[in-house]
Amino acid sequence: MIKLLEKYSWISWVFVIIIAIAIFYISSLIFESSVGGKFGWKTIAYHFLAFFSLAFFLLPALVQGNKKPFIFWGIVIAVLYGISDEIHQLFVPSRHFAISDIMVNSCGILFSSLIYTISLKLRGKANKSLFMDNCRFCQIAQKKVQDYVIWEDKNFIAFLDVNPVKSGHCMLIPKRHTDYFFDLDDELYLGLFKTAKKLSEPIRKVIGAKRIGITVVGFDVPHAHLHLIPLQGSNELFDPKKFRKAKPDELRYIQEKLKDVLDSV
């Protein structure tokens, strides 16, 4: 669930806004029983759960799995909102400013932050077993290096080759590290070719190629991958003289064109 909230951060923000408004509304209600500063278990449970929920949705909205310093700022924002909620109650009849409420709010926020931090560490350990530290393609899949990614899902990622045979030459790889192409398990093997089929037509149309060629070599980078190459004729593959170093501006231009089309694929 947390990964889903990170991916679709707007959902997290919707929940954050709803919870924040609900807290403000409840704090605006007048309860005669609150006079005298009663602090029962219901009050404790409300404050803890309300701010636990606020932080639970705020952290994925800010952090999104790879910006760990933002956990601190998420905690700060949530705590400051809790303090402002208590200040607001100074202006509500029969309500009062309570340090005890702020302490319970903060406990809920910190507990939520602890759960989120643990989830990040567990995912990091799980992901580490899927990747090789010295593999360039694994680094691209983990977003450790900047590259010209044009499409990805949970299992595969496609990006532009920086030494293309033709403009629009793409690499399609499984995110999980496997050296030899034919060592892929059946699910990934079939999924890779199904994905290549899905991406080929949008790439062909954007580049203006007659066909998209596929090659599997496997010696250049020890990570199973497909080359998707826009072609105008049959004589455009397998000639080393066709390879060239692409300019960054050219790669960025093609990347943006393809990403716009492939976002809906």
Image (spheres, helix red, strand yellow):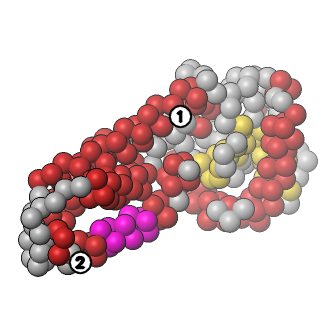
Q: Can residue 253 be found in the magenta stretch? A: no
Task: Identify the residue under disc 2.
Answer: 29
Q: Nearer the viewer, residue 168 or 91?
A: 91
Disc 1: CA contacts within 10 A as few (<14), some (14-19) or many (>=20): few
The dot on residue 205 is: none
The amino acid at mark 2 is Leu
The amino acid at mark 1 is Arg
The dot on residue 123 is: 1
Give the image quarter of residue 216. top right
- Main SS, magenta region, reads helix
Position of residue 45 in the picture relative to residue 137 (left or right): left
Q: Residue at x 77, y 26 (%)?
A: 218
Q: Nearer the viewer, mark 2 or mark 1?
A: 2
In percent of width and height, residue 58 lies at 37, 56
In percent of width and height, residue 189 lies at 84, 36
Q: Which residues are magenta?
A: 13-23
Q: Nearer the viewer, residue 214 or 88?
A: 88
